Each structure stands twice: as C-alpha cells, then as structure tokens.
Amino acid sequence: MNAIASLAVARNPEAPRLQVEGLSIRFGGLAAVQDVSFHVHAGEVLAVIGPNGAGKTTLFNMVSGVYRPDAGHLRLHGEDVNGRRPFELARRGMSRTFQNLQVFFRLTVLENVMIGRARWEKTHVLSDLLMLPSVRRQNAATREAALRCLTRVGLAEDAERIAGNLSYGALKRLEIARALATEPEVLLLDEPAAGCNAVETAEIDRLVRAIADSGTAIVLIEHDMKMVMRISDRILVLDQGRVLATGLPADIRRDPRVVAAYLGTHADEVQTRSTASEANHAAD
Ligand SMILES: Nc1ncnc2c1ncn2[C@@H]1O[C@H](COP(=O)(O)OP(=O)(O)OP(=O)(O)O)[C@@H](O)[C@H]1O
C-alpha cells in the first residue's frame, strides 16, 4: 500500500481534491491574502490570475504548506490538512512547481526526476549506504517511474542528457516531470510557461491539459492570458489579496471589474481571440 492509499480512510471520495476556505495571511501591516476560498476537482484546471503583487504566489505558499495561514482551512480530499508541512502534503498527493527554475543543471534529466521521487519515497539512510537488495529494487523502480514521467512530458529521449543543455522550454517541462514524480492528485503550477516562446508555450499548454485530463486537479498561476483562456475550466481573479471574481473563462474575460483591474492591457488580445474562436464555432 503506498503512502496515498494508506491515507484513504481519512478521505471523502465526494469531496473536491483541494478545498481552500477563507485563507488569510499578513506580512506586518500588509494583508497579502484575505479570506480567499476556492476548490478544484479531479480533472479540472483552475487558473489563478491577477496583477503583480495580487497575492498569487503567497496563496500558493499557503496551500503548499510553505507559509502557515493566519486564518482559514485547507482540505485535501476533505481531510483537514491545516498546518501540514510541504512533505506531508506531498505524501497526501500534492505537488508544486516554482516560478523560478529549480533544476539541478549538472545532473542528468533522469536524475532530476529521480530526486523528485526519492524525496517522496520512504528510504532509510542505513539501507541506502549498504545498498541492500531492497534498495537496489527500489532504485530500479524509481528509475522506471521517473522515465514514465519523462515520457509524459516528451523528454524520454533526453533522459541521459545533462539538464543544463536543455532548451528553456524543455527545462520548464522537466520541472513539471519532477512535480509528477510524486504521482500527485493535486498539482500546483506557478507560471509554467513564463519565459517560453509561442511554440514552447503551446507544448506546455497541451501538457497541462493532458495531465488534467488524466485525472489530476490542477491549480495554475499564469500571466499568459491566451494560455489561461485556452486551458482553464474556471478562473479565480485575485486583486490586492482578495477574490475579485471566480467563473468560467468566457465570463471572466467579459467581467468589467476584471477588465478594469487586470485584463486592461491584455483585453484586446483576449477579446480578439475570443471573437475569432466564437466565429469559428459559429461556422462549425
Ligand atoms: N515574505 C514576504 N514578506 C513580506 N511581504 C511579502 C512577502 N511575500 C510577498 N509579500 C508581499 O505580499 C504581496 C503579494 O505578493 P505575491 O508575491 O504573493 O504576489 P503575486 O500576485 O504572486 O505577484 P507576481 O505576479 O508579481 O508574482 C506583495 O505586496 C508582496 O510584496
């Protein structure tokens, strides 16, 4: 029985994969996140958008156990996981990527993913040092699992390359592969397409959607509005730490409060795309 299965008794199968209720945190006098609630089900992509400084990363840091909220509740499969640390949340099926690349550039692509998995697997220092048969079997299983993750992100053929030699878009996919190494049921992606060109963004776009379609619940922070509108099932808009709006992409892009607070500079491109897509649908 793996770590996730052993926790099944604490779970409510009907509950959203992740449920956040009234999360708040202050940094000194600054209310960085105030009373934020949302949920995400298996197979859904929820995008969190908002202007710089709106509180998106701080929200992720609370949800992933990096920061302890001043108020609010966090539930995974209905289980209250308030105050749990990041590795405890990982054992319960949550994984995340960070805004900045967290890749070991001198290791191989495969080793990067194996590290992501080894941190999550139960290993014992002494048996590791002695290289007991059980450890060798474990290493082989870790390697195979890591290769499966690389296959999912389209990097299996690059497994033995030094990570530092990958293109930027491939590095962003490697980060996702590492997050997948813990077999997450909830995946938090912090700007997975930041810095990518259009082709690389399209690859990540397809990848994120495919991961969700395989049953993972995804929460995504992303500034690329085209990508957000394309792959999200729902969007939550943060402004000055508070929820400004939550809804379907089509509703969010038409919400005058959202356009005023955030989409302003992106509104034309989003609107153009939306009009073109509506025209295509009308033509179908
Ligand atoms: N550790 C911290 N200590 C003090 N203030 C912080 C800390 N982390 C974030 N803040 C402040 O909290 C607010 C929200 O920041 P946060 O990084 O969460 O915003 P964001 O929406 O992720 O922005 P961006 O899109 O630029 O990444 C900002 O005013 C920021 O300066």
Image: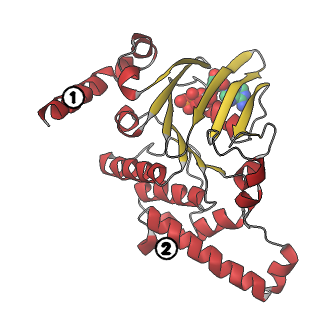
* Amino acid type, mark 2: Ala
Question: Residue 159's mark?
Answer: 2
Query: Between disc 1 and disc 2, whose residue precedes?
Result: 2
Q: From the viewer's perspective, is the residue at label 1 or at label 2 nearer?
A: 1
Give left or right: position of 144 versus 173.
right
Would you place residue 188 above or below residue 144 in this image? Answer: above
Q: Tell me what residue is drawn at x 57 percent, y 76 percent.
A: 144
Would you place residue 187 above or below residue 257 in this image? Answer: below
In the image shown, does 212 or 230 lie closer to the viewer?
A: 212
In the image shown, does 142 or 7 lie closer to the viewer?
A: 7
Would you place residue 210 above or below residue 268 in this image? Answer: below
Q: From where the camera sits, is residue 108 visible?
A: no
Q: Position of residue 122 (x, y in %)?
A: 78, 68
Q: Tell me what residue is drawn at x 26 percent, y 27 percent.
A: 274
Q: Which residue is mark 1?
A: 278
Report the number of numbered marks. Answer: 2
Q: Position of residue 119 (x, y in %)?
A: 72, 63
Give the image quadrant in which the ligand numbered 1 is located.
Answer: top right
Image quarter of residue 35: top right
* Element assignment for label 2: loop
Q: Tell me what residue is drawn at x 70 percent, y 78 percent.
A: 138
